[in-house]
């Protein structure tokens, strides 16, 4: 059973940074793609950033230039570096992995951007 465990969320002031981590229970090369989604209250879950096995990356327009997705293969971990945070980035952030015909989700980590 694949497990994804997120960490690194919290309360931060606008303009500051946070780094989220997603630790997988198996090698991240076993997944076709991994990524970060977020869901704000009353809104649909949306893709924030994704990375494929080959290292290709994509980002939501709203975070381009501010967020960076990366991975540490030895640690089976994917990261989301979030800089210049804005109040509209406030949401529950989920790690996602796609393998075969299955989607896997972490439990989520809350990010709140507020002064």
Image (cartoon, helix red, strand yellow):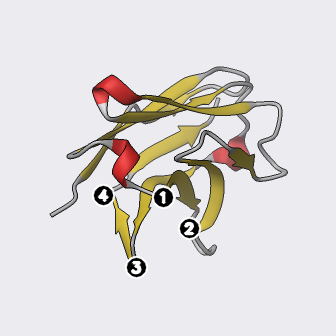
Discs 1, 3 touching: Cβ within 8 Å: no
Label at residue 41: 2
The quadrant the N terminus occupies is bottom left
100 vs 59: above or below = below
- 42 and 49: which is toward the camera: 49
The image quarter containing residue 24 is: top left
Label at residue 107: 4
Residue located 36% across and 63% down the image: 105
Q: CA distance from mark 2 to mark 4?
A: 16 Å
Could you say whether the residue bearing mark 4 is in a helix, strand or loop?
Answer: loop
Q: Could you say where residue 60 lies in the image, as x and y percent from the top left?
A: 76, 53
Residue located 36% across and 34% down the image: 77
Mark 2 vs mark 4: in front: 4
Outermost residue on the left side: it is 1
- Residue matched to label 1: 32
Residue located 84% across and 51% down the image: 61
- 17 and 31: which is toward the camera: 31
């Amino acid at each position: 059973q694949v497990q994804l465990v997120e960490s690194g969320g919290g309360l931060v002031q606008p303009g500051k940074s946070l780094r989220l981590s997603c630790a997988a229970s198996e090698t991240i090369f076993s997944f076709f793609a991994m990524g970060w989604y977020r869901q704000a209250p009353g809104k649909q879950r949306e893709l924030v950033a994704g990375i494929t096995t080959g290292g290709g990356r994509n980002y939501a327009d709203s975070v381009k230039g501010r967020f960076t997705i990366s991975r540490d293969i030895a640690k089976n971990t994917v990261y989301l570096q979030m800089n210049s945070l804005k109040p509209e980035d406030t949401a529950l952030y989920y790690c996602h992995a796609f393998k075969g015909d299955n989607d896997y989700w972490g439990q989520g980590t809350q990010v709140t951007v507020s002064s």
